[in-house]
Amino acid sequence: MRVLFNSFSAFLRVAIATMMQYRGEIFLWAVWGLINPAVLYAMWSAAAEGNVDQTLAGFDRGQFGAYYFCIMIIGHVTTAWDAYELGYFIRSGSLSPKLLRPILPVWEALAANIAYKVATLAFVVPSWLIFYLIVRPTFSAGLWQISLGLLAVVLAGVLNFVIGYVVALVAFWSPKLDAVGEAYFGMAMMFGGRFAPLEALPWLLKEIALVLPFRWMYAFPAELLMGKIATASEALAGIGMQLVWLAAFVLAFRVGWAAAVKRYTAVSG
């Protein structure tokens, strides 16, 4: 455990220093996380105001503002790119020295993930505040909803990171990891509630979303933070589902990683 702590601390320091050297690039990455929900807010709020009752799928303009304000924050916390990056490490051979270390490469990836989120806070937090002041979102959440919502956001970030790394293991068997990563990102956008609140989806797409893990990474914490989830039992059930999915994908990672390393060692000699 001490080796893990010391190694992770070193990874985190190096990652933050690296992020500071590439401020322009990480600025552009962070901009996408702001523009996308802002554009979707404008689209869906305009659609709602075009209806007679000025609502769409139970959301009015202020509630769409609250939803996409939360999605902005959740999107930042859940950002992960291992579904694209691991394939490069394998093709370039840079994974080999990582496997010689006493801890798994996933911990270095986690440190880089956290470093990015810390390094971009100085930009994204003022942007969130500007969006809030312009949009004036309507929140109805109480203290217990905010408290559980923050926990749900953290769990969503961990869940997306783990799932992304499991998806990345495909690179050990196929060179088409970029295509797999794009498919994963697209499914998260559609079935997670990033493109639209799940209530606004057609019936079939909504039913599909209910059996996939993506809603627990985006729609659920957003609805909890804005006050759409009215009872503590429903909120706790949602957090329970996050934990179930997290446990399932941690197990999938352990099994998949063992098989992936065995294959990598056999192929690379």
Image (cartoon, grey):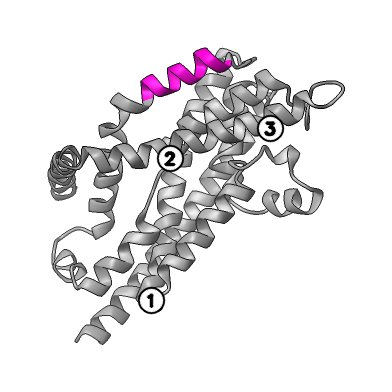
Q: Residues within 10 Å of mark 2 (few under 14, many from 20)?
A: few
Question: Would residue 156 be seen by someone viewing this image from the given angle?
Answer: yes
Residue span colored magenta: 125-135
Give the labeled residue for mark 2.
32
Q: Confirm or deny contact between disc 1 and disc 2 (CB under 8 A).
A: no
Q: Earlier in the sequence, mark 1 or mark 2?
A: 2
Identity of the residue drawn at 55% across and 39% down: 218
Question: Would residue 77 be seen by someone viewing this image from the given angle?
Answer: no
Q: CA distance from mark 1 to mark 2?
A: 26 Å
Is 51 magenta? The answer is no
Q: Quadrant of residue 136?
A: top right
Point out the image quarter for the C terminus.
Answer: bottom left
The secondary structure that most of the magenta stretch takes on is helix
Is 133 magenta? The answer is yes
Q: Which mark is residue 175?
A: 1
Viewer-nearest of labels 3 and 1? Answer: 3
Q: Residues within 10 Å of mark 3 (few under 14, many from 20)?
A: many
Q: Is residue 268 left or right of residue 40?
A: left
Answer above or below: position of 123 versus 19.
above
Q: Quadrant of residue 8?
A: top left
Q: Earlier in the sequence, mark 3 or mark 1?
A: 3
Q: Amino acid at mark 3?
A: Trp
Viewer-nearest of labels 1 and 2? Answer: 2
Q: Residues within 10 Å of mark 1 (few under 14, many from 20)?
A: some
Give the labeled residue for mark 3.
44
Identity of the residue drawn at 32% across and 26% down: 123
Identity of the residue drawn at 53% across and 20% down: 146
Where residue 212 appears, x then y in whole percent? Answer: 63, 53
Q: Which mark is residue 200?
A: none
Where residue 155 appears, x then y in whole percent? Answer: 46, 39
Circle 1 — which element?
A: loop
Q: Quadrant of residue 164?
A: bottom left
